[in-house]
Image (spheres, rainbow, N blue to C red):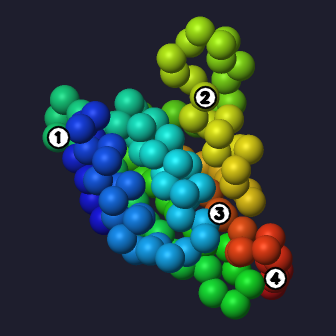
Amino acid sequence: MTFPGTATAISSPRGFAADLLAGDPRLDEVVLMLSEVATNAVMHTATGQGGTFLVTISSGHHGEPLRVEVHDDGADTQPQVNQSGADETHGRGVAIVEALAYRWGCEPCTHGTKVWFEAACPGGVVTQS
């Protein structure tokens, strides 16, 4: 689903995930990580020129992790884990994703950046193919 690259749009991807994953035990983790990645997308997308970001959620089946991708159309920036101080009000998003995700990463795209993360199956069992 595509969302406008504005600060007021951050709640929309959370609602999208909550509707799609209702009843999934990973819902809270996924919504938190999605909120952090979507916030970064808004910060880096071309908001002044009608920028958008795309959220894709691929439901994990049969031992596969659930995958979430956020593709922004802003500058090609790679997310980094910051060492934010206790008094700082931002800069913890990637650290949260790194702590909660089964695995995560980012890929430069022709227009912007795609950040993805995976949430392990309930019970932490993941089948590798």
Residue visible at 68% across and 30% down in the picture: 81
Q: Contact, CB < 8 Å: mark 4 with mark 2? A: no
For mark 4, give the secondary structure: loop
Q: Is residue 88 visible?
A: yes
Q: Which residue is mark 2?
A: 92
> For numbered disc 1, what is the local secondary structure?
loop
Q: Nearer the viewer, residue 97 or 19?
A: 19
Locate the C terminus by quadrant: bottom right
Label for residue 50? 1
* In the foreground, 78 or 116: 116
Q: Is residue 34 left or right of residue 97?
A: left
- Left/right placement of residue 81 relative to residue 114 reads right
Instruction: Give the residue type that dot 4 points to.
Output: Thr
Q: Nearer the viewer, mark 3 or mark 1?
A: 3
Cα separation between marks 1 and 2: 27 Å
Q: Earlier in the sequence, mark 3 or mark 1?
A: 1
Q: CA distance from mark 4 to mark 3?
A: 13 Å
Disc with the residue nearer the chain's start (4 vs 3): 3
- Please provide percent x and percent y for residue 119: 66, 64
* Disc ID at residue 118: 3
Measuring from the top left, give residue 128's x and y in whole percent. 82, 80
Q: Please, what is the three-letter code of the amino acid marked with disc 1?
A: Gly
Q: Amino acid at mark 3?
A: Glu
Of mark 2 and mark 3, the one earlier in the sequence is: 2
- The disc, 1 or 2, on the residue closer to the chain's N-terminal end is 1
User: Which amino acid is tagged 2?
Assistant: Arg
Residue located 45% across and 46% down the image: 35
Q: Quadrant of residue 24?
A: bottom right
Please report whichever mark, 4 or 2, sits nearer to the chain's N-terminal start: 2
Numbered badge on residue 127: 4
